[in-house]
Amino acid sequence: MTHSIDPAILDALDSAGLDTAMVADLVDRALAEDLADGPDITTAATVPDGQTGRVEAVPRQAGILAGLAVAGYVFAVVGQGRVAVELHAADGDIVRPGEVLLSAQGPVRDLLTAERTALNLLTHLSGVATLTRIWTDTIRGSGAAIRDTRKTLPGLRALEKYAVRCGGGVNHRMSLSDAALIKDNHITAAGSVAKAFELVRAAAGELPVEIEVDTVAQCREAIEAGAELILLDNMNLAELRSCVALAAETGGRVKLEASGGLSLQVAAAVAGTGVDYLAVGALTHSAPVLDIGLDLKSGWRPDGATGAEG
């Protein structure tokens, strides 16, 4: 579908490193869920045709912002040149209650039709960024980084991983083919840690290869096989330290990622063992939304005058 989009919104998406075609497809599908059976009946019944107004997106709690240009894109798509959008903050910003993050002005019917889709994306992505920042703050100074996983909502992976970056985290692989991750079932199928690594390395060429291990002995086997990135699954602190000691013997060749059973309560202790990454699926599969509201400004006029809307 062809849309009339303000170049400023497109520039903001580009600056964020987001693919416009991906955002456009996602927004089209999201809006189709609301408009599959026709226009917004409630808005059409209560808002006179031609009435104009202004809405402002304002957080009701503090957090980290992500997805503001995506929300702006929603208003632009619905407005098709009739709605002017302004972004008053930037993704990655710390936002506080009462701040205006985004404003949009134009036909009220367009503004209210776009409201829920825009907020669904903005509040979810900001929630992911906010939770990620909590995790990164918890292990700050340890030298370890917080990494996401593929435990993302279908269709939202690219945006959720972007939100993780806004919160200070780093990304794991995007798909099953841009990097290899040998898990316990692959090891069982292949027969051993070393054999699984050998088979994937032969097939994957120069792609990054990570292998999951459950014991210190398996970690040693993976290192001896040539692994450079090892996922330590559900290990206790003593086991993690033993694996870190093994990795240290490689002179920095091997990086370690702790996974499984992680919580904010133990994050600092796990990071303190010397691992390089903490893999946290909760960043994307369990992040609560950041509460952001959208308010129609009563009596707004483009020239700054006030009074009842016409």
Image (cartoon, rainbow, N blue to C red):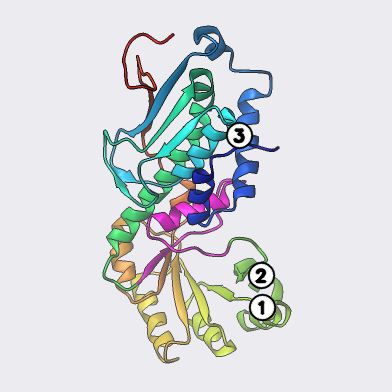
Q: Is residue 267 left or right of residue 48?
A: left
At 31% from the left and 53% from the top, the residue drawn is 134
Which of the pair 177/96 is nearer the observer?
A: 96
Nearest to the eye among marks 3 and 1: give it.
3
Tag 2 near tag 1, CB within 8 Å: yes
The dot on residue 30 is 3
Q: Which residue is mark 2?
A: 186
> Considering only vertical position in the picture, is 137 above or below 125?
below
Q: CA distance from mark 2 to mark 1?
A: 7 Å
Q: CA distance from mark 3 to mark 1?
A: 41 Å
Assign a secondary structure to mark 3.
helix
Q: Is residue 19 above or below residue 111?
A: below
Contact (Cβ within 8 Å) of mark 3 with mark 2: no
Residue 56, position in %: x, y?
37, 29
Can residue 16 be seen at all in this image of the molecule? no
Whether tag 3 and tag 1 are in contact, CB under 8 A, the answer is: no
* Marks 3/2: CA–CA distance: 36 Å
Magenta extent: 144-173
Quadrant containing the N terminus is top right
Residue 100 in the image: state x and y as whole percent. 32, 35
Instruction: Point out the residue furthest to the front here.
Output: 303
Q: Which residue is mark 1?
A: 196
Question: Would residue 153 be counted in the magenta stretch?
Answer: yes
* Three-letter amino acid code at the position of disc 1: Ala
Question: Which residue is located at x 28 percent, y 60 percent?
Answer: 138
The kind of residue on which mark 2 rests is His
- Which element type, helix, strand or loop, lies under badge 1? helix
Q: Is residue 158 above or below residue 181?
A: above
| Quadrant placement of the C terminus | top left
- Report the amino acid beneath label 3: Ala
